[in-house]
């Protein structure tokens, strides 16, 4: 069995924590590890084979670093050239599995789901494997615990085996009244988006129902290139691939589909209210992170990174405070956060793209201040890492080291810059920075110039492959 972990989601319903450059699968929301780290640990419970992770270009180093943090060095990270929904993404993984293993059973999991019983999940996967070997495509339908309007549903058909059913139909997210009716009938299951199937079985169904998708994915993987621990399917071949979900492309058409009733606690962590439901709470139903005071307050979820937050006489709130944004919402309204995100995209798009603290393969930086013609960042470079050799057309920079030692090259001159020392980089000067020390390097960068955007970086060489 080969675990395939889908890690390409954006998680906009968990703004302001989840953003385009740092979506929910890489956040520590429930438990002590991030969601993708928890998913990888579930994968290790079902197979000794390293997982295949499917993510996009922007998240590749973030993904690799989070895997390294939990000791996974051998995972293959498959970079989806363009977001095309779940059907092509799974097809890329199936093609790669056939290329590397001839054929195998794939267990398709989402990187941003929560399952509290790993042993039950592993037992369920093993139970359905016999059906996968026989050519079936088995999806996991979760027994509903409430009339949820945020999930799609699967209607059970005739029983095939113990706990496994034929699929009568897939239905979209219902309104409240319909969800209540679904739950009362006991004929419907939540659509979890998890699958077990042979790679060859899935590709055979694509040939039948989506031949253009099959051809594009087959060519893209055949012409793929390896870059560090990343596999890059050919972008030109993949660009013509149709966009579709696995449900629409395959599951609603195939006669090979089955659904198993999954009777364990499961959540797609799709809203702040679902996180509150999973979180540890005090006797008043409150969950608090950071410096907080709650008086006569009940059933609140409060997360603060820096500020001291006090809540008096208020119930059922979601309060999320980050370095650059504050969300205050009623728990009953959190499904509408996408409306907030859409308005931000029109007026303040940076608040949907990045956090104030932005992660890079060499470390991270925090934009701590800005004004007309200047910007101030706190930069942290991990031990042994190096920024690209680069130059800027529109800005000069001052670097002031506050912790550690920096090897700085400006033009032809290399300098060792230690704590409380600084260096100046003029506009147009080629420069680089490296931390050869044993501790993280911290410095303050003061930029000045007519344009201070991140796209004013011309890279000449880069150890992380970011030079075209």
Image (cartoon, rainbow, N blue to C red):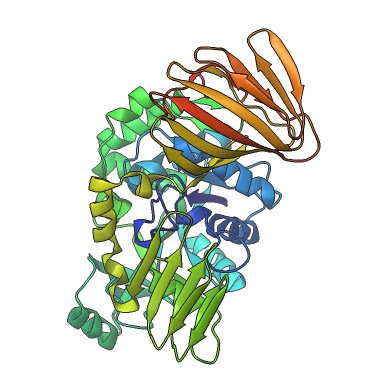
Q: Quadrant of residue 206?
A: top left
Residue 423 coordinates in the image, percent (x, y): 66, 23
Whether residue 225 is situated above or below residue 319 in the rendered picture:
above
Q: Is residue 461 visible?
A: yes
> In the depicted view, which residue is nearer to us: 353 or 46?
353
Tell me where residue 137 appears, x and y as whole percent: 39, 57
Placement of 11 over or under 312, stated as above or below: above
Q: Tell me the residue at 67%/7% (across/down).
A: 412
Q: Left of 306 or right of it: where is 315? A: left
Residue at x-position 46% and y-position 37%: 58
Task: Estimate the x, y position of residue 262 in percent, counting from the top left.
Answer: 45, 74
Q: Residue at x 29, y 68 (%)?
A: 335
Q: Quadrant of residue 185?
A: bottom left
Spot occupied by residue 293 in the image (x, y as percentages of width and height): 53, 81
As displayed, is residue 241 above or below residue 130?
above
- From this viewpoint, which residue is outermost toward the right? 438
Residue at point 54% right, 15% down?
426
Q: Nearer the viewer, residue 69 or 388?
A: 388
User: Number of marks in the image?
Assistant: 0
State whether residue 151 appears in this view: no
């Amino acid at each position: 069995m080969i675990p395939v972990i889908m890690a390409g989601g954006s998680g906009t319903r968990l703004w302001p924590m989840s953003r385009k450059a740092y979506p929910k699968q890489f956040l520590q929301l429930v438990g002590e590890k991030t969601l993708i780290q928890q998913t990888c640990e579930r994968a290790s419970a079902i197979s000794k084979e390293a997982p295949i992770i499917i993510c996009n270009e922007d998240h590749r180093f973030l993904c690799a670093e989070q895997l390294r943090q939990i000791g996974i060095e051998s995972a293959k990270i498959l970079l989806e050239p363009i977001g095309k929904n779940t059907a092509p993404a799974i097809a890329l993984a199936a093609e790669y599995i056939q290329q590397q293993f001839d054929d195998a059973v794939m267990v398709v999991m989402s990187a941003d789901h929560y399952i509290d019983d790993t042993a039950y999940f592993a037992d369920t996967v093993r139970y359905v494997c016999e059906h996968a070997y026989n050519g079936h495509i088995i999806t996991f339908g979760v027994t509903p615990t409430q009339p949820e309007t945020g999930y799609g549903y699967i209607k059970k058909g005739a029983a095939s085996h113990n706990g496994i059913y034929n699929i009568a139909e897939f239905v979209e997210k219902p309104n409240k009244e319909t969800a209540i009716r679904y739950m009362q009938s006991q004929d419907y299951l939540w659509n979890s988006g998890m699958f077990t199937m042979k790679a060859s079985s899935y590709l055979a169904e694509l040939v039948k129902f989506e031949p253009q998708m099959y051809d594009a994915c087959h060519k893209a993987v055949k012409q793929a290139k390896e870059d560090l621990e990343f596999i890059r399917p050919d972008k030109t071949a993949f660009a013509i691939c149709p966009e579709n979900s696995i449900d629409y492309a395959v599951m609603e058409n195939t006669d090979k589909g089955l659904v198993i009733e999954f009777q364990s606690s499961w959540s797609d962590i799709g809203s702040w209210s679902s996180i509150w439901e999973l979180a540890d709470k005090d006797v008043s139903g409150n969950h608090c992170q950071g410096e907080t005071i709650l008086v006569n307050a009940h059933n609140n979820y409060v997360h603060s990174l820096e500020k001291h937050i006090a809540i008096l006489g208020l119930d059922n709130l979601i309060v999320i405070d980050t370095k650059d944004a504050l969300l205050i919402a009623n728990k009953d309204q959190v499904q509408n956060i996408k409306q907030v995100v859409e308005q931000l995209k029109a007026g303040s798009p940076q608040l949907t793209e990045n956090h104030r603290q932005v992660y890079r393969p060499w470390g991270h930086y925090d934009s701590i201040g800005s004004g007309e013609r200047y910007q101030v960042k706190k930069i942290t470079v991990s031990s042994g890492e190096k920024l690209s050799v680069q130059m800027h057309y529109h800005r000069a920079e001052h670097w002031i080291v506050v912790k550690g030692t920096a090897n700085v090259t400006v033009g032809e001159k290399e300098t060792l810059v230690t704590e409380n020392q600084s260096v100046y980089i003029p506009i147009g000067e080629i420069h680089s920075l490296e931390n050869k020390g044993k501790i993280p390097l911290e410095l303050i960068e003061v930029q000045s110039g007519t344009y201070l955007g991140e796209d004013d970086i011309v890279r000449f060489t880069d150890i992380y492959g970011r030079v075209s």
